[in-house]
Image (spheres, rainbow, N blue to C red):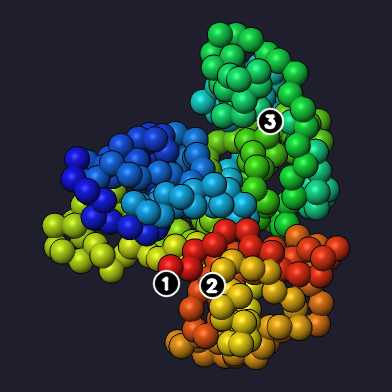
């Protein structure tokens, strides 16, 4: 393959039937370069946003997993499966006749906030050096440690076929590491009838949204038209959902060396092209992440330490 012509991020609309690795393989052929990486798996039957890193941007693939995500999921009540979605083997069936719109809404809201979720056997989580899905395909079921996940918002979008078919659609905004299949299963357990995910669309990853995503066919067309470069985004866009701060120009040399800065060293300012000036907050919380600028240049992602009362560099991107 050729040298890495493309460097940056591209928002792909993954289609059903493709694994995330399939998308990367197709892009390597379309873009004629090897250095490409995806930033978090989507189940083969799921569709939606898959942010892909190209060339030098592949060094930030690990950071994309930190971002919140949004989904629209269609759920089938009255059934459980070994994969927690409707592609798996049916394990049990339950009575959905008592599930009403009110009881369903109440069940959904019970999951808002932080809860411990047990990863499904058919997942990429590693136990003892092996992916869980590898063990599941051999018929093995192993103990999995629950993981804390956060459901920021969950709402019922459509229950028009709830009474007749036991099907509803919901929107979920959640933290990293949340398995929507497992959330569906857990909702079914709470309702006492079981549930499995029927369809899933990921509508956003951080600031990347479905309406801006490109299918592989469209990417190929843009390549042939010579306009694909307009859709390759700088790495900075990956962090558009983080609060921006500008550090005093007097600290330029300190910033160039990757040093920490204090909240009182943040000034009212913003880079060229921003409509409103960025103003310091009155206070910051432990672990809060920001994207830091100085004299119009972006330096990277910093995380606040309440003990040190400083913003310390998490990922440094400044290139002189």
The residue carrying pointer 3 sits among few (fewer than 14), some (14 to 19) or many (20 or more) residues within 10 Å by Cα, namely: many
The residue carrying pointer 1 sits among few (fewer than 14), some (14 to 19) or many (20 or more) residues within 10 Å by Cα, namely: few
- Position of 262 with respect to 134 (left or right) is right
Q: Nearer the viewer, residue 202 or 238?
A: 238
Q: Secondary structure at mark 3?
A: loop
CA gap between label 3 and label 2 equals 41 Å
- Position of 24 with respect to 91 (left or right) is left
Residue 21 % position (x, y): 39, 35
Q: Which mark is residue 147?
A: none
Q: Nearer the viewer, residue 228 or 62?
A: 62
Q: Secondary structure at mark 1?
A: loop
Q: Quadrant of the C terminus?
A: bottom left
N-terminal of the pair, mark 1 or mark 3, is 3
Q: Which residue is mark 1?
A: 320
The residue carrying pointer 2 sits among few (fewer than 14), some (14 to 19) or many (20 or more) residues within 10 Å by Cα, namely: some
Q: Which residue is mark 3?
A: 119
């Amino acid at each position: 393959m050729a040298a890495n012509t493309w460097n940056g991020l591209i928002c792909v609309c993954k289609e059903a039937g493709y694994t995330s690795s399939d998308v990367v393989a197709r892009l390597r052929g379309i873009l004629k370069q090897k250095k490409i990486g995806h930033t978090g798996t989507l189940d083969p039957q799921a569709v939606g946003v898959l942010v892909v890193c190209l060339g030098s941007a592949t060094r930030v693939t690990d950071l994309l997993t930190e971002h919140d995500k949004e989904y629209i999921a269609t759920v089938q009540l009255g059934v459980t499966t070994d994969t927690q979605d409707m592609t798996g083997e049916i394990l049990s069936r339950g009575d959905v006749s008592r599930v009403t719109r009110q009881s369903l809404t109440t069940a959904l809201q019970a999951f808002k906030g932080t809860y411990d979720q047990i990863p499904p056997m058919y997942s990429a989580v590693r136990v003892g050096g092996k992916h869980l899905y590898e063990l599941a395909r051999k018929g093995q079921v192993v103990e999995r440690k629950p993981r804390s996940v956060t459901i920021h918002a969950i709402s019922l979008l459509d229950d028009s076929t709830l009474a007749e078919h036991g099907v509803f659609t919901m929107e979920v905004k959640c933290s990293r590491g949340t398995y929507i299949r497992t959330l569906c299963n857990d909702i079914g357990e709470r309702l006492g009838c079981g549930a499995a995910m029927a369809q899933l669309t990921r509508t956003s990853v951080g600031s990347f949204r479905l309406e801006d995503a490109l299918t592989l066919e469209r990417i190929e067309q843009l390549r042939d038209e010579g306009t694909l470069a307009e859709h390759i985004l700088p790495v900075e866009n990956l962090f558009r959902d983080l609060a921006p701060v500008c550090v005093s120009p007097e600290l330029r040399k300190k910033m160039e060396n990757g040093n920490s800065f204090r909240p009182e060293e943040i000034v009212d300012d913003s880079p060229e092209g921003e409509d409103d000036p960025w103003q310091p907050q009155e206070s910051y919380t432990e672990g809060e992440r920001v994207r830091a600028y100085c004299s119009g240049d972006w330096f990277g992602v910093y995380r606040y330490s309440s003990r040190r009362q400083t913003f310390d560099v998490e990922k440094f991107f400044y290139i002189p």
